Amino acid sequence: MSNKAPNQVNNQVPDQIPKQANQSNELALIKKGVVDVVGQKVQEFVSKGELHLPPNYSVENAMKSAWLILQNTFDKDKRPVLQVCTRDSIANSLLDMAVQGLNPAKKQGYFIAYGKQLVFQRSYFGTMAVTKRVAGAKDIFAEVIYKDDEFEYEIKNGNKYITKHVQKIENVDPNNIIAAYCTIIFDDGRQFTDVMTWEEIQKAWSKSKMNPDKEGSTHKEFAQEMARKTVINRACKRYLNSSDDGSLLMYHVNRADEVAAEAEVEAEIAENANQELIDVEYEVMDETPAAEETKEEQTKEEIAEKPKQEKKQDKPQQGKQQTVFEEGPGF
């Protein structure tokens, strides 16, 4: 992002580690700088009343879990992210995690390196947790719709309401999925439902870097579960994006998504730079003597045949009138 917000950790973490330090000392220095800075920042938010963490959430435990995971996280080139990514991006990814009240040990998010930028991306478990916390959602559930299911919904004031879903056990077949839906139920009784067709689900999968079309992939082996995850993610994100909540939590919810999207685009541009391939069409000429002789004979025959054809064309055919149509409005 071009403009750095005050709630980010910038230029507070030492970016240079002494070259003479061994790997263990280097990790210790990174941990001390990153964990201390992020911990202080979170405590500052809490003390000012800008952030209210879940009652059962421990920043310290979440940071310890994240640090253990980061030590075994690598980029696409199999390089340790703690060595490749900038210290600021590591600190800010941990800050995004902590402010959202998430813990990677609970599969609520993942650390992903895009070039030198480390970002924290929520999983669908994390998105559900944030939705419940921000919107006061009491329950979030999703169902898959199969061919021959009896399914109906109505739309009132722009909102979808499921009115009927009857499913027989013989309909349950991963090869017969036609749609999926997610319903968010709030404490005050309100509901928010999103429905995705099978085509929309597959289109969402096509953007994944996990190669969902590969034989034996998770998307193929567990199509029903992956369809549920996809519609839950979209429903929760749609509701969160429609929220006018200007809290610090929502800032980091949106920031994490934006940073991840921008970092992915920048990494893709850098990876594809100077790699454009230009296809040039060319004709392969046969230079063999036999080919040259054949070509020469064909040329002589064409020269001999040309006067005959011209004489024939000079004589107009009797009984037939030549007509030329000029293209106009009617043709």
Image: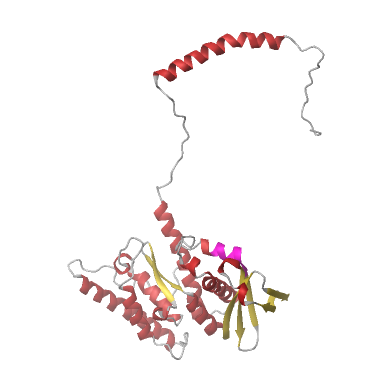
The residue sitting at the front extreme is 170
State yes or no: residue 200 in magenta.
yes
Q: Quick one: 300 or 276, which is closer to the camera?
A: 300
Name the quarter where the C terminus is drawn.
Answer: top right
Query: From what the image shows, is residue 323 above or below residue 274?
Result: above
The secondary structure making up most of the magenta span is helix
Left or right of 202? Residue 260 is left
Query: From what the image shows, is residue 94 above or below residue 330?
Result: below
Q: Quick one: 222 or 81, which is closer to the camera?
A: 222
> What residue appears at the point 30 percent right and 64 percent down from the top-left corner?
79
> What residue appears at the point 39 percent right and 87 percent down from the top-left corner?
58
> What residue appears at the point 78 percent right and 18 percent down from the top-left corner?
322
Q: Position of residue 124 (x, y in %)?
A: 50, 75
State yes or no: residue 43 in magenta.
no
Left or right of 18? Residue 8 is right
Q: Quick one: 201 or 325, which is closer to the camera?
A: 201
In the rendered structure, which segment of residues is drawn in magenta?
Answer: 196-204
Can see residue 7?
A: no
Left or right of 155? Residue 181 is left
Residue 88 lies in quadrant = bottom left
Can see residue 131?
A: yes
Q: Position of residue 11 (x, y in %)?
A: 34, 71
